[in-house]
Image: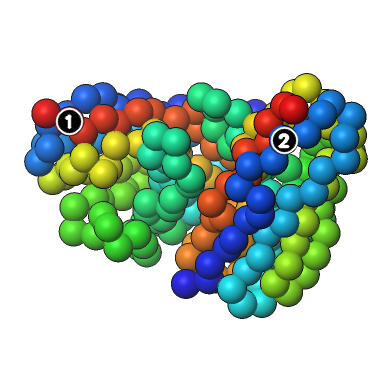
């Protein structure tokens, strides 16, 4: 059974940093693209970042470029999102997602972790 | 980027009703469209992919149709568990954009 379990969310002040983690199991992690999708309170779904199977390609939504870094540790079956210079508008539930390619739908989602940016 | 527009934004219906949600793409996406259901506090759940392919385990009252720029999600007979927010998503382009969502409420 495919499982994606996020952790690392919490309350942080504007300008601060957080690192989200996603522990994957039930599939060959090294064979899949992975992504982070977020959802601000009461809003819709937004791709944040995507990473190729071997980490050689990474894509970011414009609003997080230069501030967020996606990474993938295949031996540890883990996905990460390093978030720096956080802003109030980054407040959202962040979901880990397994995808087949840069443009793909999501069959498997994590349960989400809440990031709140506030003073 | 390809824009996805859902209508209506909110829909009120009775248990047992047949309902249809529409999703329009700003340019042709062939059949590269998915539909999700999301309940409060939960991750989205994949219902339909490739416009009309029912995901394994999803109830047969859900169906999808369309191609090009116009798509529909139909629930043939609403059940209490179906009241949720529904999103479409195109994956014809790398941006793989989502629609803004349709909230389905109990009348």
Q: CA distance from mark 1 to mark 2?
A: 35 Å
Q: Between B86 and A51, which is closer to the camera in this rendering?
A: B86
Question: Residue B16's quadrant in the figure?
Answer: top right
Q: Is residue A87 left or right of residue B89?
A: left
Chain designation of label 2: B
Residue A96 placement: quadrant = top left
Residue A62: x, y in percent? 30, 63
Question: In the rendered image, which residue does mark 1 sit on?
Answer: A118
Q: Residue at x 27, y 58 (%)?
A: A63
| Residue nearer the viewer, B89 or B101 | B101
The kind of secondary structure element at disc 2 is: strand
- Choose mark 1 or mark 2, whichever is in front: 2
Q: Secondary structure at mark 1?
A: loop
Q: Which residue is mark 2?
A: B12
x, y percent for residue B87: 62, 47
Q: Residues within 10 Å of mark 2 (few under 14, many from 20)?
A: few
Asked whether the residues under the numbered discs 1 and 2 touch, taking CB atoms below 8 Å apart as contact, a structural biologist would say no
**Residue A14 location in percent, x, y?**
12, 37
Towards the viewer: B49 or A14: A14
Outermost residue toward the bottom in this view: B27
């Amino acid at each position: 059974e495919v499982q994606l379990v996020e952790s690392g969310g919490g309350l942080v002040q504007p300008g601060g940093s957080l690192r989200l983690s996603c522990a994957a199991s039930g599939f060959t992690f090294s064979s899949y693209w992975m992504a982070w999708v977020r959802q601000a309170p009461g809003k819709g779904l937004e791709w944040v970042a995507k990473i190729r199977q071997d980490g050689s390609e990474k894509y970011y939504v414009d609003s997080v470029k230069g501030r967020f870094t996606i990474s993938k540790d295949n031996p540890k079956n883990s996905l990460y999102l390093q978030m720096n210079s956080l802003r109030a508008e980054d407040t959202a539930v962040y979901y880990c997602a397994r995808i087949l390619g840069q443009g793909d739908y999501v069959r498997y989602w994590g349960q989400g972790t809440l990031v709140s940016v506030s003073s | 980027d390809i824009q996805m527009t859902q209508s209506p934004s909110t829909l009120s219906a009775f248990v047992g009703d047949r309902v249809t949600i529409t999703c329009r793409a700003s340019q042709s996406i062939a059949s590269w469209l998915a539909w999700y259901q999301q309940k409060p506090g939960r991750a989205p759940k994949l219902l339909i992919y490739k416009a009309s392919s029912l995901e394994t385990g999803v109830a047969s009252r859900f169906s999808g149709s369309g191609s090009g720029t116009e798509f529909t999600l139909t629930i043939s007979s609403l059940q209490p568990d179906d009241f949720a927010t529904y999103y479409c998503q195109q994956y014809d382009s790398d941006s793989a954009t989502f629609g803004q969502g349709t909230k389905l409420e109990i009348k």
